[in-house]
Image (spheres, helix red, strand yellow):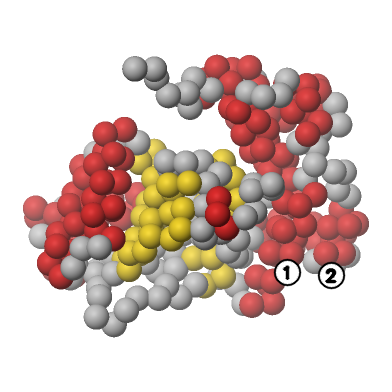
Amino acid sequence: MKPHFHKVPVQSQTSFSIRHDKNSGFGTVWHYHPELELHYLLKGKGVRFIGDNISNFSDGELILLGENLPHTWRVEEGAESNSNVEVIIIHFLPTCLGTDLLHLPEAYLIPRLFERAKKGLVINGEAKEKVIRLMHSAVNAQNLDRLIALLSILKILAETPEKETIASAHAFYKSNDSETLRLNKVYEFTMANYRNDINLQDVAAIANLGITSFCRYFKLMTKKTYNDFLVEIRISHACRFLIEDRLATEVICFECGFNNVSNFYRHFKKVTDMTPLEYKRKYLYKSVPEMA
C-alpha cells in the first residue's frame, strides 16, 4: 500500500531526535520519512508492517529502519490501551553527524549499514544489549555526550553480524492524502475483522470501489492480492498464539479466521515454510527465559 510521508519533529538546537515514550499507543498510519529510525520496544506486542514484511512484535525488540522505508506498528486487539506500549526511538538523518564522516576511510562500515537498513534490520544478541544500554543513557544526554552516544551506537550496529534483514525490497510508491486515507480504512477494517469471513464486496465498499477495480488497485499498491494480505495477517496472529502456548492448534485455526484445519495448515506452511508444530518448537523455547 502507498505510505504517507511523515515529518519527524526535531528541535532546532539538536541534530537528531530521541524520545522515550511511555503509555503511548502506536496506531499510526502506514508512513515513511527520510530519517533512519532506531526503535527499541520496552513494552507492547502486536503486528508490525515493514516494507513488504508482516510480522509480530513483542517486548525487547530492537529494529533499525532505513531512510524512506514504509512501516507501521499495530497493538494487538485487546491491548489497545495506551498503557500497553513503551518505546525509545531515535530518528536521525544519514548526514546528521556531517557528510564528511560518511566519506572517511575509517567509517566505511557506516554507509554500508545505512544501505542495508533500507530493508530494515532486527538487532540481536550482545549487540542488542549494548545498544539498548546506550539508548537509555542517550535519552538524557546533553551536548557532546549525546553525539558520542549516537556514534557509539552506530559503531556497534555497523560492526556486528548479529542483525537480520526484515523486508525483501524497499521500493514503494509515494501517496497523496486521499490514497493514504483509503488504504488505511481497508487496513483498519482487516485488522478489526480478520477473525471473521471477509468477502471482497465488503472490503471493496470500504475503499469505495467496485470489486474488480479494488482488486486491481490493491494489487498495484501492495504488490499482492487482498486475499494474500488477509492470509498473512491471520498467520501472523496464529504465530503469536502458538508462541503464547495457551490454545490448541485446532482452536488457533478458527480464532484466526480459517474455516478448516487443513486450509490453515496449508496456508501456514506457505507463509512460514514450517508447520505450526515446527514453528512452535523453533520459537516457543526462544521466548521462555532460562532459569538461573
> Vertical placement of 205 versus 238: above or below?
below
Q: Which residue is drawn at 26% across and 46% down?
A: 133
Q: Which residue is drawn at 65% across and 70% down?
A: 180
- Between 201 and 130, the one lying in front of the other is 130
Vertical placement of residue 26 versus 129, above or below:
below
Helix, strand or loop for disc 2: loop
Quadrant assignment for the C terminus: top left
Q: Where is residue 30 in the image (x, y as percent from the top left)?
A: 58, 62
**Mark on residue 208?**
2
Q: Which of the two discs, 2 and 1, labels the residue nearer the N terminus?
A: 1
**For the residue labelled by badge 1, is the local secondary structure a helix, a strand or a loop?**
helix
- Quarter occupied by the N terminus: bottom right
Indicate which disc residue 227 carries.
Answer: none
Query: Which amino acid, by three-letter code, is at mark 2?
Result: Asn
In the picture of the structure, the residue carrying the numbered disc 1 is 182
Task: Identify the residue at horizontal 34%, vertical 61% (top origin).
Answer: 90
Q: Do the residues labelled 2 and 1 touch (CB within 8 Å)?
A: yes
In the displayed orientation, state which residue is furthest to the bottom.
12
Identity, as a three-letter code, of the amino acid under mark 1: Arg
Residue 168 shows in this picture:
no
Cα–Cα gap, marks 2 and 1: 8 Å
Q: Residues within 10 Å of mark 2 (few under 14, many from 20)?
A: few
